[in-house]
Amino acid sequence: MIMRKYLAIFILLSLMFPACIHKKGTGKSAKKVQKYENESRSGTYDEDLGAFVLEDDADYDLFEEAEAKKDAKKVETEDDLWAWEDLDEEQPAETVYFDFNQAKIRNDQRPVLKYNAGLIKLACEDGARVILEGFSCLITRSEIYNQVLSQRRADAVKKELIKLGVPKDCLKAVGRGTSQLITQAEGKEAQAPNRRVEIKFIYPQ
């Protein structure tokens, strides 16, 4: 009788033990899913910008570091190439302005480009190199986006100047992002002066 009692207890424990193991495994799996969800990136959609912006710019740290090293190497190379040249203190060319979040040439800026093209042609004949520096405003927190947009603006001006007869070889388009702000006032209208391309002349010494 005692032997049968112990045998029944043993069988009961054998049936319960696998169930405990299965239950423990399920809890571990659920924990993994929860951890993944907590670590997912969050962001918001900016209607004015027309793009998703991450809540924390720290998500860009690795990319920004790589881009910064690349830009630094590029600037160092350019300094070596232009070590024999001086920036003209007087910059007669007019600034070209852009609409918010746009790199398209505005119709009211075409006369400005035509005027600048005439000056640039004369400067190129004198051996000058012309730098087209694009800039952006502070509406978005993403410096990467600002950098790309400012480069697109500089490229757009370069393309139009070439159409107007300016030699391609004497033009260089560079995006500066928000590195040289004209104003830090808030709002799209107040930030308008920052959305621009400046034209600078570099002459041989």
Image: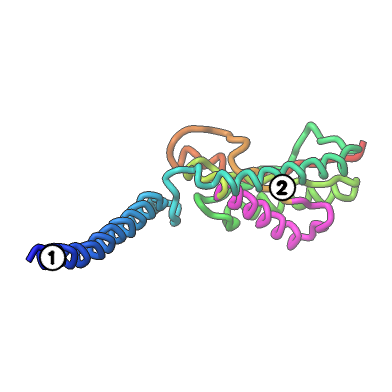
Q: Which residue is mark 1?
A: 3
Q: Is residue 103 above or below residue 22?
A: above
Q: Is residue 70 above or below residue 25?
A: above
Q: Secondary structure at mark 1?
A: helix
- Tag shown at residue 76: none
Q: Could you tell me residue 86's position as x and y percent? A: 85, 35
Three-letter residue code for mark 1: Met
Q: Quadrant of the C terminus?
A: top right
Q: Could you tell me residue 161's position as x and y percent? A: 73, 56
Q: Is residue 134 visible?
A: yes
Q: Which residue is mark 2?
A: 70
Specify the principal SS of the magenta part: helix
Q: Could you tell me residue 120's position as x and y percent? A: 79, 49
Q: Quadrant of the N terminus?
A: bottom left
Q: Which residues are magenta?
A: 145-172
Q: Is residue 195 visible?
A: no
